[in-house]
Image (cartoon, rainbow, N blue to C red):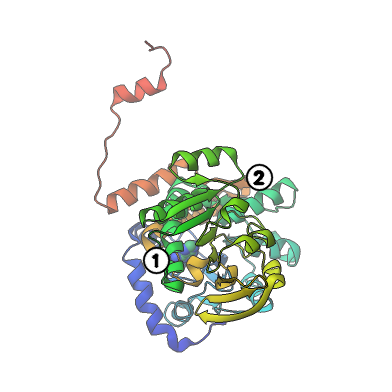
């Protein structure tokens, strides 16, 4: 079996953690049981590029139960849990190419190794795999029926590819299912981002001023949870509607330049470049801490930070102190890599359950329907999204009302008014 992981001796530790996460993924488990019987992915090759976590391990086990041959690589150089990678290889017979802390060259070497299987399905988180396939490995495109994409950033890239006529097969935007973004992006990112910051710094959120850049679903989650922990939260936005939402949700809204001298802690979740740049670093107060929780490490301008830095040293794991030319010491977390996965364990399994139920059903759906679809980005059908929600509710022991026949008719009619 091919693989490239840090140390297979870590497997037993990884297995325990994979099983622990599995306890909180009942919907995925139900899908796995069905997949085991029906084998909807039988003999199909999947190249998966995801954060190699305990939750992803449970997804891989589910896809394998469905009959797929999988090659898994990491979707970020700092998010791999090495014990999980080891266990997937040693205990579950899944080919993994992922080591935490690899350089850019090895990151892409692993993506290429995942692509070597000549996949029928691509499963991506951020679209690095799809973009490598479409630029450097075009000879493999012919085989691919379709793909799935996990995250907002990846969906944006894929839509840009489709608009350019560059996308060669249909992709399901798993991110855009309600059972994904409403929970994973909001509650998952909300909790795991603060978890990462707290693990890295042991910083007290209560009473501090937290600046949240971006008020999409991820930003909403972080702002809400920081407020819950007692922070004074400032939101920065470029979208006028989201800015009103943030204001009416009770946060202060202002441009980043104004927020710069006020923040004790800054978190970027915009999906765009240069959110924190030279002018912001220069205005930050002594002791300010800043981290990114967006997909790529581009939101905090590292080049500008280097230009302003007189001296730097690692003061804790994941924390680098930069002494600036103006004399201030400011603290950069996890080299700007997503803080929730680099300094903590990513989103809890309880939300990843729904995200990865979506991935599993999307893989099954694209395999069945890929040939009929156009080369663009689709949502998972609403019926499947609702089914995942119903299964999740059931697993939580929550019952809800059902529409009566009369209510259904009313909703479908237009004649009844005042
Ligand atoms: N993205 C965010 N959290 C994650 C997790 N726990 N596993 C995989 N991908 C993630």
Identified at 25% across, 43% down, the residue is: 399
Tell me if residue 360 comes above or below residue 405 in the rendering: below
The label number, if any, that marks residue 374 in the structure image: 2
Tell me if residue 3 comes above or below residue 361 in the rendering: below
Extreme residue in the bottom direction: 9
- Say whether residue 68 is visible: no
Tell me if residue 302 comes above or below residue 151 in the rendering: below
- In the image, is the residue at mark 2 within 8 Å of ligand 1 by its beta carbon? no
Q: Which residue is mark 1?
A: 204
x, y (%) of residue 280? 64, 59
- Secondary element under disc 2, as helix, strand or loop, is loop
Query: Does 20 sit left or right of 370 as displayed?
Result: left
Quadrant of the image containing the N terminus: bottom right
Instruction: Pick the residue in front: 200 or 230.
Output: 230
Q: Nearer the viewer, mark 2 or mark 1?
A: 1
- Secondary element under disc 1, as helix, strand or loop, is loop
């Amino acid at each position: 079996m091919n693989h490239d992981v840090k140390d297979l001796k870590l497997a037993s530790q990884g297995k325990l953690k994979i099983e622990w996460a599995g306890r909180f993924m009942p919907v995925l488990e139900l899908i796995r049981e069905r997949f085991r019987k029906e084998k909807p992915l039988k003999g199909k090759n999947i190249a998966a590029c995801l954060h190699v976590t305990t939750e992803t391990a449970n997804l891989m086990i589910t896809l394998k139960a469905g009959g797929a041959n999988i090659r898994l690589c990491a979707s970020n150089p700092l998010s791999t849990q090495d014990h999980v990678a080891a266990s997937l290889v040693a205990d579950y017979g899944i080919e993994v190419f992922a080591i935490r802390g690899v350089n850019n060259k090895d990151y892409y070497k692993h993506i290429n190794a995942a692509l070597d299987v000549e996949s029928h399905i691509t499963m991506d988180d951020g679209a690095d795999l799809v973009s490598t396939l479409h630029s450097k490995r075009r000879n493999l495109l012919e085989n691919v029926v379709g793909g799935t994409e996990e995250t907002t950033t990846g969906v944006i890239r894929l839509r840009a590819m489709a608009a350019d006529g560059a996308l060669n097969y249909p992709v399901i935007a798993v991110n855009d299912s309600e059972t994904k973004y409403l929970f994973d992006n909001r509650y998952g990112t909300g909790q795991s981002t603060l978890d990462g910051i707290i693990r890295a710094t042991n910083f007290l959120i209560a009473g501090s001023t937290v600046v949240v850049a971006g008020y999409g679903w991820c930003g909403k989650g972080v702002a809400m949870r920081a407020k819950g922990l007692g922070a004074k939260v400032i939101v920065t936005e470029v979208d006028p509607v989201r800015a009103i939402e943030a204001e009416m949700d009770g946060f202060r809204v202002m441009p980043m330049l104004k927020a710069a001298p006020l923040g004790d802690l800054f978190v970027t979740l915009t999906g765009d470049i240069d959110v924190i740049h030279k002018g912001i670093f220069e205005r930050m107060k002594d002791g300010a801490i800043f981290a990114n929780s967006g997909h790529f490490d581009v939101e905090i301008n590292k080049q500008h930070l280097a230009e302003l830095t007189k001296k730097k040293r690692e003061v804790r794991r994941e924390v680098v102190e930069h002494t600036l030319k103006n004399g201030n010491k400011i603290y950069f977390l996890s080299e700007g890599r997503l803080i929730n996965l680099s300094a903590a364990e990513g989103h809890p399994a309880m939300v990843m359950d729904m995200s990865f139920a979506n991935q599993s059903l999307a893989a099954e759906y694209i395999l069945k329907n890929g040939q009929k679809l156009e080369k663009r980005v689709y949502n998972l059908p609403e019926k499947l999204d609702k089914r995942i929600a119903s299964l999740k509710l059931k697993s939580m022991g929550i019952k809800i009302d059902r529409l009566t026949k009369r209510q259904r008719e009313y909703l479908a009619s237009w004649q009844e008014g005042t």
